[in-house]
Image (tube, rainbow, N blue to C red):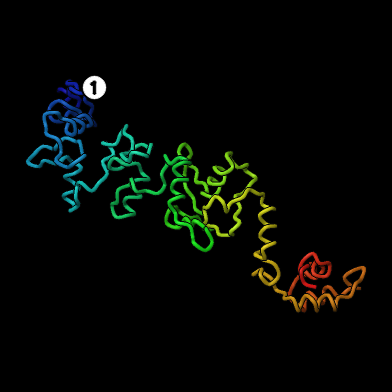
Amino acid sequence: MADITTPADDCEVCAKPAEPDNRLKGGAHIRYCYQWRRRNDASRPECSTAKCGRRARAGSTDLCDRCYQRAQRGNDPAGRPFHQANKGKACSVEWCDDDATHLGCCVNCYAWSQRNGGADPVARRYRYNRSVDDLMALIQTIEPDPASGCRVADGAFWTNQHGYAITTIAGNKRTQTVTRLALAHKLGRPLLPAMQACHTCDNPPCVEQSHLWEGTAADNSRDRDSKGRGARGEGNGRSRLSPQKVRDIRARYTPGNNQHESNVAALAAEYGVKPQAIRDVVRRHTWAHIL
């Protein structure tokens, strides 16, 4: 008896012989090629969904298989991203160089549009092609405060958790602070990694170049303390002492060669701090501003 499970005919698309688990369908194609032919048959019209690019399925519908299935579920076929139409294409946003992934846009531009009610991604504030000159021109459009002269970047740039304006520059997708870029433009050279862009106005959102100066972290801390802005004494939220308690500790302290001869342990227990905190107060390592 002839073996009917293994036909001798080969697939017209891939020329492979049919197998028991991959028999010929449609008269001349094995299973996978049959599905491919259904999607790519040039004799069929294109799917009526805009930007789809697939061939319409057989029958009375003018939709492809995927759009037809989406319509059957009650969804708009035009609402799904057509990844196959984006292959090898760049993002449609003129200043973005990323590859297109969703409806002609890259994943970031598409996500931004979805978060903003379908707005045009061209309006994104993260402009990867923005040059330093473009950045400075944007800063000049911010009206300075009449009283302080600060150009507050609220609304013109994104801000981080500390209130500093941040952006990106062409050729470097790493997020940077606008103050650091503006100071580097003012100095005519990039800042060293160990240097900071400090404010004379002590206003983090300010991007006015004349209010910025270069300094180390120690310089910035000294400037803060000289203006009385440091978390010193009761200004430190973790402090358990007060100026009056500090004076009492120094007045009542009994020196000794060890903890048994001095009253450090007793004072620490009374004021709810560690013995080392009492020693630091007495030696003026802390609370040095209290006489």
The residue most toward the left is 60
Amino acid type of the residue that numbered disc 1 sits on in the rendered structure: Lys
* Rendered location of residue 211, percent (x, y): 57, 54
Task: Quickly name the residue at label 1.
Answer: 16
Answer left or right for 124 relative to 22. right
Quarter location, residue 47: top left
Percent across and percent down for residue 197 are 59, 50
- Residue 270: image x %, image y %? 77, 79
In the picture, the quarter occupied by the C terminus is bottom right
- Vertical comparison of 279 with 142: above or below: below
Image coords of residue 77 (percent x, y): 19, 47
Q: Is residue 157 left or right of residue 52?
A: right
Specify the quadrant that holds the N terminus.
Answer: top left
The residue tagged with tag 1: helix, strand or loop? loop
- How many labels, in total? 1
Q: Is residue 177 left or right of residue 100?
A: right
Q: Which of the two residues, 72 or 199, is positioned nearer the viewer here?
A: 199
Q: Is residue 68 above or below residue 279?
A: above
Q: Is residue 258 left or right of residue 171?
A: right
Q: Is residue 56 above or below residue 111?
A: above
> Which quarter of the picture shows residue 287?
bottom right
Query: Could you tell me which residue is drawn at 64 percent across and 70 percent down?
Result: 237
Rendered residue at 89%/73% (across/down): 262
Q: Tell me the residue at 52%/63% (across/down).
A: 147
Q: Residues within 10 Å of mark 1 (few under 14, many from 20)?
A: few
Q: Front-most of 43 and 36?
A: 43
Is residue 64 or residue 172 the one in the foreground? 172
Query: Outermost residue toward the front?
Result: 146
